[in-house]
Image (cartoon, rainbow, N blue to C red):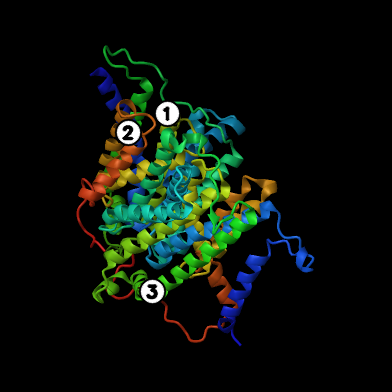
Amino acid sequence: MSLSDLKIPLLVLAAVLLLVIPADLTGFGIPWPGLRRYGMFILSLWLVTSIAAMGVNLIMGYAGQESLAQAAFLGIGAYTTAILTKAGVPFGVAFVVSGIASFLIGIILGFPALRVQKHYLAFVTLAFSVFVWLVIRNEEWLTGGVSGIQDVSRPSLFGISLKPALYYYWFICAITAMLGAAMWWIIRSPWGRAFTALRENAIRAESLGIDVRGYKLLAFAIGSAYGGFAGALYAPLVEFIDPTPFALASSLLYLLMVMLGGMGTLIGPFIGAGVAVLFPEWLRFAEGLAPILFAVIVMIMVALCPTGIVGLFERIFVKRRRPHADDKGPVLGEVKS
Amino acid sequence: MSDFLQLVIAGLATGAIYALAAIGFTLLWQTSQTINFAQGEFVMLPAFFALAAMKWWGLPFSIAALLAIAMSMLVLGVMFKNIIVDPLIKQGVLPMVISTIALAIFLKDGVKDVYSAEAQSFPTILPDIILPIPGIKISLAQVGVLVVAFSTIMGLSWFLAGTRTGRQMQATAQHPTVARILGVNVERMVMYTFLINAGLAAMASLLISPIYLAKFSNGETLGLVAFVAAIVGGFNQVRGAIAGGLIVGVIDNLAAAYVSTSYRQAVPLALLVLIILFRPQGLLGRKEERAI
């Protein structure tokens, strides 16, 4: 029995554990008091971060582009949702609007940047990231400026209020599962195959008739929409938003966590987000040290195991079935970009 | 009018410093395909080498400044190339981007933890006295910045165009394989590029820190203007980076005075987007790569 046969049962087991662990099970005769509020908050934060990281993974791991603005899209989603729900719009509508807004902004940003090669999308998103932060900080009439927006309410579903931390956590679980399934479908679909093809070799993909620019644009816009969705879930989770978590530094962190987890894999963003969310918690005793250590680990990983934690795991536990050709070597007459 | 002139001169002074950072960025890209996302932190760090030498060893500023340049060539030149870039060069651009971003976080938080989170005042090369020119307020310190930055730029241009080593470096940048066939020691030229980048970053750091104060988080803004300057001028041209730096410096200063201080940072970014929209090869760049 190999590891790949165990994939589905393992996934189901993980899903059940994720649903049950935070709950108080003493009523069912199991001596498990569940997680406290803070533990549930960390788990919820991990899932929200994972959603945004899935988006980055589509952009970076599948389309081979760098987006340095995922936290900015999170901010757009969070502020859109906060402002709309404050104005009485139902959460469901605000959630969808957050995603669509991010998607459209992604198209507008990506369209000029992807006309040229040389990783200009990275610079355009870098600029956008700073710009969004400036707007959030300066436009006090809309965003509350540095003091932010307080008391963002949590939604209710079929008449049940999701105010309790456990219910909102389950709600996030459900949304994460849906968005994860959508991502799985995107990657398995002909679209996803095209994404992979253009990451592996853009010139060859183009010669096979794939509209390289169109697909890169689509990947960037969908990835950004995931950022918007994550932001829409984030605002009611923390119930108070201010500009800090949407600054450039957080956007950079998303790139690092996706790399650390394993680019171009479905599970990688979840692992990377888990490390990124839990790392500062483990290192509470030495607060300033967490980002430095995280950066060092990422630099070491990039150098020694560019496929990330997923790749490391595979290297250790899964035997190579057949020898691979070296796919890093240059192909005759091509310039690796 | 004299206000405007003053702003332009101040803009040229900071612009010349931005140009130093942008030239280094462009050179690294040309010779080794390294997009250095830590370039801003490279400009932030050397000032702290100098501050540390002055505070902990009690050295005078002039010696501390020289020491900072030497340290930066060692750390940001030799060590950066050997430890970060060399192991990644075969893996393409993306891993390098990630690694230099991680390096930027490392340097930024490292300086914050090791030295201080507060902004530090930094000595100027020439004293900050207003020159007795009627009508315009120009300080001697500004003149010092202009003179040092422009002589560095001119010295570098002469080195690249007028010396044998400089021309070998240009050949390496244009086509490493052909350069190697012609007998150029490509590895050594790439190492020189890293040393020059580190030296330019150190010069920029020593010149900019009296103006903006030395702070661990300076790298974010400085890196951004260096990227914008490099792209505005043309990614593949040293003279493009010079022009880009000066333009961004002047626009930045004018924007702070005439637009609004809260959106000052956004003005160079708007310029970046306009350039990418209408002239993606940059003002002085030439079209060379396919757009895919």
State the SS at label 3.
loop
Q: Amino acid at mark 1?
A: Ile
Q: Position of residue A265 (x, y in %)?
A: 48, 70
**How crowded is the residue under tag 1: few (<14 C-alpha within 10 Å), some, or many (20+)?**
some
Label 2 belongs to which residue?
Answer: B252
Give the image location of residue B241, x and y in percent. Answer: 29, 44
Judging by the rendered image, the residue that carries numbered circle 3 is: A329
Residue bearing mark 1: B211
Three-letter amino acid code at the position of disc 3: Gly
Q: What is the total number of numbered labels drawn onto the structure image?
A: 3
Q: Position of residue B70 (x, y in %)?
A: 48, 42
Image quarter hosting the N terminus of chain B: top left
Q: CA distance from mark 2 to mark 1?
A: 14 Å
Q: B118 and B75: which one is in front?
A: B118
The subunit letter for the residue under badge 3 reads A
Q: Viewer-proximal residue, B59 or B292?
A: B292
